[in-house]
Image: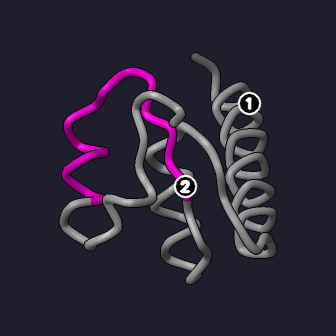
Amino acid sequence: MSNLFRLLYYKIVHREIMDMISILSGCELYIGFSFHGAITAFSYGKSVIAYDYAGNRKTVDLFDLICKSDCYTRTGK
């Protein structure tokens, strides 16, 4: 992989990450299935509803750990 490609890749990925952080930090509520999206929203003090369609153990464990299991669903109900 060339240095130019690495630099371009880094700049694109970094920009996308910073854009998502900016969006999540400005929202009032995050509803989504991204584990890292939920963590980012929580870190900015936002309300989070996690829809975990895949049943990831780490997601349910996180919500249990921070006493927010009522904000977690696997079924959408």
Tell me if mark 2 has few (under 14), some (14-19) or many (20+) residues whose alpha carbon lies within 10 angstroms of its own.
some
Image x and y of residue 7, in percent: 70, 39
Name the front one of labels 2 and 1: 2
In the picture, which quadrant includes the N terminus?
Answer: top right
Q: CA distance from mark 2 to mark 1?
A: 40 Å
Q: Which mark is residue 4?
A: 1
| Tag 1: amino acid | Leu
Q: Which residues are magenta?
A: 49-63
Q: Is residue 2 left or right of residue 56?
A: right
What amino acid is at disc 2?
Answer: Ile
Residue that mark 2 sits on: 49
Q: Quadrant of residue 52?
A: top left
Q: Choose top left, top right, bottom left or bottom right for residue 28.
A: bottom right
- As rendered, which of 69 and 14 lies closer to the eye? 69
Left or right: 10 in relation to 63: right
Q: Residue furthest toward the top? A: 1
Residue 53 drawn in magenta: yes
* Coloration of the structure image: one colour
